[in-house]
Amino acid sequence: MQDFDEVTWFDASERKIGGTRHTFGFGQTKDHYEQLLAFNAGERSEPPEGYTAPFYKADRETEMRAAHAYFTQRMKDA
């Protein structure tokens, strides 16, 4: 999973854009990821077509820890 997460980004509309064919988002072309890298590096003024800045990476470990804590508390409260 970490390898996939390393090359996977999300835009402000939560559209996925990935760097390998296994992580491509819906409607993504091969060029979109290269355009994203250029945009993030400041080499390009516009994000890839169809995507909205800012871009972020998911932090699965933090998200899973928060979910675990939430559901653990719900079970304790039940």
Image (tube, rainbow, N blue to C red):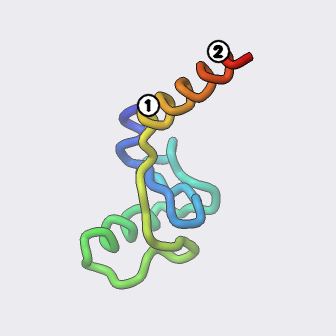
Q: Residue at x 63, y 56 (%)?
A: 26
Q: Residue at x 47, y 61 (%)?
A: 30
x, y percent for residue 14: 58, 59
Q: Quadrant of the C terminus?
A: top right
- Residue 76: which numbered mark, if any? 2
Instruction: Check disc 2 and give the amino acid type.
Output: Lys
Instruction: Check disc 1 and give the amino acid type.
Output: Met
Tell me if label 2 and label 1 are in contact, CB under 8 Å: no
Furthest residue in direction front, as rendered: 77
Q: Residue at x 64, y 15 (%)?
A: 76
Q: Nearer the viewer, residue 46 or 60?
A: 60
Q: Quadrant of residue 47 in the image?
A: bottom left
Q: Residue at x 31, y 69 (%)?
A: 40
x, y percent for residue 41: 25, 70
- Frontmost of labels 2 and 1 is 2
x, y percent for residue 51: 53, 71
The vertical placement of 57 against 50, above or below, is: above
Q: Quadrant of the N terminus?
A: top left
Q: CA distance from mark 2 to mark 1?
A: 31 Å
Q: Judge from the rendering whether residue 23 lies leftward or rightward of residue 46; answer left or right.
A: right
Q: What element does badge 1 sit on?
A: loop
The numbered mark, 2 or 1, whose residue comes first in the sequence reads 1
Q: Residues within 10 Å of mark 2 (few under 14, many from 20)?
A: few
Number of dots carrying numbers: 2
The residue under label 1 is 1
